[in-house]
Image (spheres, grey):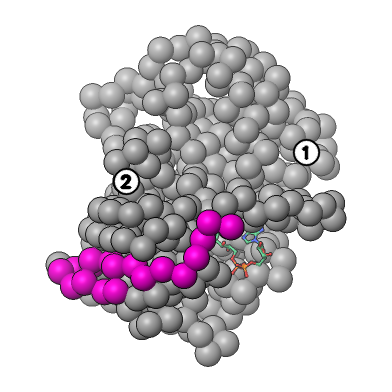
Amino acid sequence: MSSPYLNLKVVEITRETADAATIHFEHPQKQKIDYKPGQFLTLILPIEGKEVRRSYSLCSTPHEAPRLSVTVKRVEGGLVSNYLLDTLQVGQEVKVMEPLGNFCLTCAPANQRQVLLFGAGSGITPLMSILKAVLHEEPNSKVTLLYGNSNEDSVIFKEQLQQLEANYPERLHVVYIYSQPKQACDYRGRMNQSMIIRILERLQLAKISNGVYFMCGPEGMMEEVRHALDVLHVPADQIFRESFVSTKLQDKQQQDQHGTVVSSEDDGGITTQTVTVIYEGTEYSFVVEPDQTILEAALEQDIDLPYSCQAGLCTACRGKCLSGKVHLEEREGLSDAEMEEGYTLNCVGHPLTPNVVIEIG
Ligand SMILES: Cc1cc2nc3c(=O)[nH]c(=O)nc-3n(C[C@H](O)[C@H](O)[C@H](O)COP(=O)(O)OP(=O)(O)OC[C@H]3O[C@@H](n4cnc5c(N)ncnc54)[C@H](O)[C@@H]3O)c2cc1C
Ligand code: FES
């Protein structure tokens, strides 16, 4: 099996807005790295004496090879986003995991479809990759992007989008929505269900049968999109979503803001257990304490299991539970079908029984 790790060189850094920049990478030997539009890269960085990993969606598309680009938005107090925006330099090499993720689109030149994208803030990044891929690879498909931002200055990729709209006037339409606009605008406020329906009706996209729908942004926005698509009877298998932050974390942030206390469900059933993980032909058995996830326990034993977001979102740590029972703190990354087939996420998984065996790969 080839190594899932690569070293990429930073070849350019482009400032997008006051708090976001695009980092362009290339393989030092200009080797082409395979990925699908919408997938993400995991950066592995030595910061403050520790190796830290964070996922960043690729905003580039495969046809831009050998370049791969990610766009990072500053998170207040955030370890990695601030490091990348303030410290990273052109010429530096960064260790990454090869691209991963299921939030992606496979293009085919014969397709004739409506690709509808819903994004807000940094959630534009994977949508940008998908948008460029469709324009480049599906000459008979059209793309509509509903793009929410606080104001005109916080729009990531504004010039690129304007240029693309000029290049593809019949095939790309971007609708900007501002919650706190500085100037008069068509759509003011947060992207909500009624606004989405109104926009789609106005664009004659409310009753189509060849649509495919991708959303990425804050949980609240994605809920609104989901409700709007439900009202319009869009089949669930045509809808795809990507979260950058786990719902558990968002719930916690809301509780912190509101000062309420909630009980952590199922924690009472989690006790110390020995778990067996089979990875690349080797069997590892190790003890998992109740306050640890399976991944945390493995890493503490220097067992180099694959992982990225550590939040149950990206599926880099996915394995199949061959026996025993595992409790997941977060299951955003797994579909119902995957759960039923026994797939689990080690970064948010706790063994509930003594006989847990997980196979990765
Ligand atoms: C699949 C995937 C793709 C992603 N793609 C992108 C991308 O294209 N561009 C991008 O900028 N980020 C992206 N992210 C988010 C990114 O991985 C980091 O979580 C983010 O940069 C914050 O990391 P940090 O180390 O700066 O903050 P941390 O030190 O991890 O966190 C600091 C504080 O900020 C909060 N926080 C963490 N992340 C966010 C967030 N996204 N929004 C608001 N609060 C947050 C935490 O709860 C914590 O309180 C993606 C995440 C995933 C899972
Ligand atoms: S490391 Fe991302 S889902 Fe576990």
Is any part of residue 256 visible from this angle? yes
Q: Residue type at mark 1?
A: Ser
Q: Amino acid at mark 2?
A: Gly
> Mark 1 or mark 2: which comes first in sequence?
1
Q: In what element is the residue under mark 2? A: loop
Towards the viewer: 281 or 17: 281
Res. 217 image quadrant: top right
Query: Badge 2: how crowded within 10 Å, few (<14), some, or many (20+)?
Result: some
For residue 193, which numbered disc appears in the image? none
Instruction: Work out which quarter of the rendered image holds the C terminus and state it.
Output: bottom left
**Which residues fall within the magenta stretch?**
268-285
Q: Judge left or right: residue 34 versus residue 124.
A: left
Q: Quadrant of residue 337?
A: top left
Is label 1 or label 2 in front?
A: 2
Residue drawn at (59%, 15%), measured in percent from left and top? 231
The residue singled out by tag 1 in the image is 179
Left or right placement of residue 282 versus residue 41 in this view: left
Q: Is residue 242 magenta?
A: no
Is residue 269 on the magenta stretch?
Answer: yes
For disc 2, the marked residue is 342
Residue 172 on image: x %, y %: 48, 29
- Mark 1 closeness class: few <14, some 14–19, many ≥20 residues within 10 Å: some
